[in-house]
Amino acid sequence: MIGRRFRWVEGQQGLHVVVPVKSLAQSKSRLAPLLAAQDRQKLTLAMCSDILQLLRGSQTIQSISVVTRDAQVAALARAVDATVLVQQADCGLTAAVEAAAAHLARQGADNLLYLPCDVPLLGYQDLEALAHCAGRPSSIAIVPSHDGEGTNGLLCRPPQGFPFAFEGNSFHRHRAAAREANLCMQVLRLDGPALDIDKPDDVERFLKRSAGDPSVGLRTRRLLLDELQLRQEMAGPGGDFARQGFGMGL
Ligand SMILES: Nc1nc2c(ncn2[C@@H]2O[C@H](COP(=O)(O)OP(=O)(O)OP(=O)(O)O)[C@@H](O)[C@H]2O)c(=O)[nH]1
Ligand SMILES: O=C(O)[C@H](O)COP(=O)(O)O
């Protein structure tokens, strides 16, 4: 647990963030048409690094927990003073968040904010918006993914007891569960964390959007453009990564 950076602001709650990360070798399989296996691993590490550095620098964050069985991810997490909850196997996202919820409840935390590792456009203002939502007891805030189907952020107060049901159309399931339990629910449509990088089109969207804001997703952007040499000019208006090969063996 870390608590020293959190700065109390009236109306805001210090957030206890949980970032589950599956084994690098298993991550980002839907990007296989675009990136080779080694490059998908590098991309996951770069995105983890971006989000962990952002969390570390935010005064709205009270603790960071990374749930993983991957040694490289664990090392990255420890470097920013995050708590590493080591898993024996990749047993799915829901199980990973449930394990973190139990841990936080034992530690006496009064909230949990799930964030995936693949939202490099997440910014400080998004965390502030979430911190405002955490002010009320028995509350839920959900950040839907840009396609309106997935859950790219889920804030629960208290941390345990909500029926997490990730994967597939989880936004609708989480919203229905909050309504059924009569919880105070907010749906936060935040453009930055709404973009999770799952598919080749998402890489294109990320490069377009991050071009206007060098303060977010810096490591991810550098990796894609400089090291993996994806060509940014293809991301301009009318650019078409797939048809032009994107330079990566399509
Ligand atoms: N600890 C842990 N994290 C997981 C597991 N499954 C998914 N995650 C994490 O949950 C978040 C959202 O997962 P996905 O978007 O499905 O991950 P992904 O690597 O894009 O998945 P694919 O493209 O389907 O391979 C990411 O931070 C993942 O690393 C798991 O079994 N254990
Ligand atoms: O929305 C979810 O349940 C998880 O974030 C996984 O969704 P994804 O497969 O769209 O990344």
Image: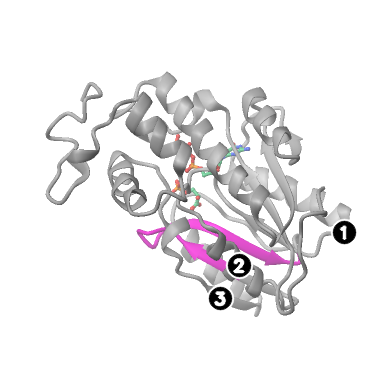
Q: Is residue 54 left or right of residue 161?
A: left
Q: Which residues are magenta?
A: 141-158
Is residue 142 within the magenta segment?
A: yes
Which amino acid type is marked by label 1? Gly
Which amino acid type is marked by label 3? Gln
Q: Is residue 116 left or right of residue 211?
A: right
Q: Residue at x 68, y 65 (%)?
A: 156
Q: Quadrant of the C terminus?
A: top left
Label 2, on which residue?
128
Query: Which residue is at the far front?
Result: 214
Task: Compare residues 179 and 206 and report the one nearer the observer.
Answer: 206
Label 1 neighbour load within 10 Å: few <14, some 14-19, many 20+: few
Label 2 neighbour load within 10 Å: few <14, some 14-19, many 20+: some
| Between discs 3 and 1, the one toward the N terminus | 1
* Closer to the eye: label 2 or 1: 2
- Kindly identify which numbered label has been placed on residue 108: 1
Residue 230, image quadrant: top left
For marks 2 and 1, give the CA distance.
Answer: 22 Å
